[in-house]
Amino acid sequence: MAGVVIVGAGQAGYKCAETLRAEGYERSITIIGAEKHFPYQRPPLSKAYMKGEVDAERLKFRSDNYYKDHKLKLVTGTRVSRIEPGARRLRLGGGETRSYEHLVLACGSVMRKLSIPGADLDGVCSLQTIEDADTIAQKLSKTENVVVIGAGFIGLEFAAVARSLGKSVTVLEAAARVMARAVPPRLSDYYLKEHARRGVSIICNAAVSEICGEGGRVNAVRCADGSTHQAGLVIVGIGANANMTLAQEAGLECQNGIVVDAHCRTSEAHIFAAGDCTFFKHPFNDEPMRLESVQNAIDQARTVAAAITGKNEPYDVVPWFWSDQYDIKLQMVGLAQGCDKQVLRGKMEDNKFSIYHYHGEALRAIDCINRPGEAMLGRRLLGSGVSPRPEEAADTDFNLKSLMG
Ligand SMILES: Cc1cc2nc3c(=O)[nH]c(=O)nc-3n(C[C@H](O)[C@H](O)[C@H](O)COP(=O)(O)OP(=O)(O)OC[C@H]3O[C@@H](n4cnc5c(N)ncnc54)[C@H](O)[C@@H]3O)c2cc1C
């Protein structure tokens, strides 16, 4: 029977194939991806690629030869339309079938869409693929006024790029503060000020009611309070859902994503899942959750490869994430959900500081601004379960490294 088939040629799909080969898996490996590109990194799409600092070639994880050299069969531009777990077979969009011994679902996420009048006007875009980024960059070059709907990471990173290119940028956020799901109020305030200082207007508690246009093209965004914001380009960054349609239709257990255990195995013994599409109990969190991050995609892909090659290595990695806006590098380690105390280390006005998140006396997460060394150390502290006391974390004279013995 055929070896491993991976659905999705993104971060997790590529990493799983690479790790399987590195671990000595010798049977056939097929990666099937809906996009026409060889596997590439998405984070630069809202950062260096959008700024024009790197080209599409540089986004690729590997050279095109890599796949041939490692006997990885890469099928691009092809969507898997159905899984038949009983027969260990899947169907491609064109009706063709493929058999598998193990199947890996690495289908990523689907961007949420606005459901208001005008949402389908020309000039209303979301940012997930190279094509999206190219379309946006081209439209950006022809307009002066940009509205970003949603002040999450992607929306704010794009706002920073557009502003640095001299555009007039307004960000409309439904919540009371920016990046509210991911960072504490103090950090939201910091980002609000940093964007305002550079001329980006961020309006929180905004209820966007309509996207207006003329001749099929967007020209403004209207809010429920009657305010209107001129826009030649609108970026919708209101989050994403797990891409779990295939899994649901195949009868796999799904909740807020494809449910996987500590080995990234789904409710079907021969089917694994990794990356943005999964929903799982993280060892660093009390409740099951989804994580949309490069780290999670890479480490779950490694976990899948370990399980397929017969190693018993459950997923147990300190989560980390980063975001680049202007010259501000945010690095988050750990998970801050459920924390009841935040401690500041350093001074916010120096643009170099960290926020330590505690649950009782236990350190659960650290958000570092322009402190890469501390983010690295934070991963080690959290990974070994070592907690500085809150007063030690707050004291910049206290040497955190000393805790690592
Ligand atoms: C603009 C942007 C900026 C980001 N910035 C950061 C960042 O700074 N830091 C960070 O940690 N994370 C960032 N992320 C998130 C990160 O890129 C994702 O978490 C990561 O790519 C998830 O990997 P994945 O393999 O699960 O999904 P993806 O990389 O999205 O890959 C999924 C692939 O599956 C394919 N697919 C889906 N269904 C099918 C099907 N039926 N048949 C065939 N193929 C299918 C899709 O076309 C897609 O190519 C960013 C994401 C975006 C979009």
Image (cartoon, rainbow, N blue to C red):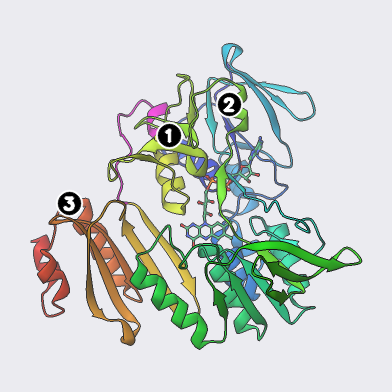
> Which secondary structure, mark 3?
loop
Q: Nearer the viewer, mark 1 or mark 3?
A: 3
Q: Which mark is residue 305?
A: 1
Q: Which residue is mark 2?
A: 248
Quadrant in the picture for the C terminus: bottom left
Which residue is label 3 attached to?
Answer: 384
Furthest-right residue in this view: 215
Q: Earlier in the sequence, mark 1 or mark 3?
A: 1
Relative placement, left or right, of 177 versus 373 is: right
275 in the magenta segment: no
Q: Nearer the viewer, residue 305 or 47?
A: 47
Q: Is residue 119 visible?
A: yes
Q: Amino acid at mark 3?
A: Ser
Question: How far is mark 1 from mark 3, CA to CA?
Answer: 24 Å
Q: Secondary structure at mark 1?
A: helix
Residue 272, given in percent of the width and then of the height, sits at: 48, 29
Q: Given the image, on which type of amino acid does mark 2 rest?
A: Gln
Circle 1 or circle 2, nearest the eye: 2
Gap between marks 2 and 3, in whole Å?
A: 37 Å
Q: Residues within 10 Å of mark 1 (few under 14, many from 20)?
A: many
Which stretch is magenta? 305-318
Against 242, residue 53 (above or below) is below
Q: Is residue 120 left or right of residue 100?
A: right
Residue sitting at 57 percent across and 80 percent down? 201
Across and down, in percent, residue 318 comes to 30, 51
